Each structure stands twice: as C-alpha cells, then as structure tokens.
Amino acid sequence: MKALHRKDLYGWARFDEARNLDFHSVLWVRPAGNVVFDPLPLSTHDAAHLRSLSGAAWVVLTNSEHVRATRELVADFGAKVAGPRAESDTFPLKCDRWLAVSAA
C-alpha cells in the first residue's frame, strides 16, 4: 500500500484492461479500528502491511461491484461490512450496517 496525502490514509490500485482504467482502494487507519473502502485483492506485501497496522475493523462498499476482496478481510480480521442501502435487497454479502445518503 502507498502512503497518501495524510498519515492515516493508504491506497492501492489495479489496472483493469477490459475497462482501460485503474480501480482504487483506500485504508483509513484510526484508533477506533481501521476502515477499508472498496477493497481490491492485496499483494502479499500489502497484506503484511495491513496486519502491521492492526488489520481491518470495517469494510465499506460503495456498490455491489466492489465486493472484490471483502470476504478475505472478513475471514482474516473479523471485519464488519457496511454496504449501500439502495442495494440491500440484492446485495451479494451479509452487511452489518447499511449506508444511505441523507438530504442536507
């Protein structure tokens, strides 16, 4: 994982040839438990880095196409999953919490 613009953020990416673009994942390191957003599979190096940062407490998924490596993070770290409420009827994973945009 690469350090980002803040000391509590890390990121990693994979290039998708079929779509001709990069997909990105972000780790937010925080005292209350780390949060991974839309996790791509981790390299061996990145998985060790995540373990050294105390793993993952939560995985936040922005849509059902971003499930990717969530099952592994749940199995390895006991992470809880938050998914989009708009997809709750058809979401491919059990979620511990549903997220929705609220009107301001």
Image (spheres, rainbow, N blue to C red):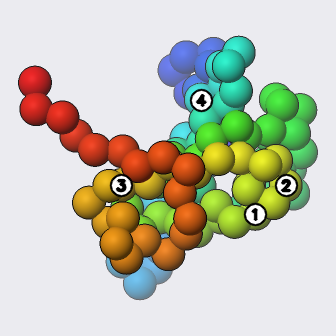
**Judging from the image, what secondary structure is the residue with disc 3 in?**
strand
| Neighbourhood count class around disc 2 (C-alpha, 10 Å): few under 14, some 14–19, many 20 upward | few
Q: Position of residue 35 (x, y in %)?
A: 61, 36
Is the Cβ of the residue at disc 3 closer than 8 Å to that at disc 1? no
**Front-most of residues 104 and 27:** 104
Mark 2 vs mark 1, CA separation in Å: 6 Å
101 to 47, vertically: above or below: above
Q: Assign the N terminus to one quadrant of the image.
A: top right
Residue type, label 2: Asp
Q: Residue farthest to the bottom?
A: 18
Is the Cβ of the residue at disc 2 closer than 8 Å to that at disc 1? yes
What residue is pinned by disc 1?
A: 72
**Front-most of residues 13 and 94:** 94
What residue is pinned by disc 3?
A: 84
Q: Which circle marks residue 28 in the picture? A: 4
Mark 4 vs mark 2, CA separation in Å: 17 Å
Residue type, label 3: Pro
**79 relative position to 36: left or right:** right
**96 relative position to 76: left or right:** left
**Judging from the image, what secondary structure is the residue with disc 2 in?**
helix
Is the Cβ of the residue at disc 4 closer than 8 Å to that at disc 2? no
- Is tag 4's residue or tag 2's residue first in the polypeptide sequence? 4
Q: Assign the C terminus to one quadrant of the image.
A: top left
Residue type, label 1: Glu
Residue type, label 4: Trp
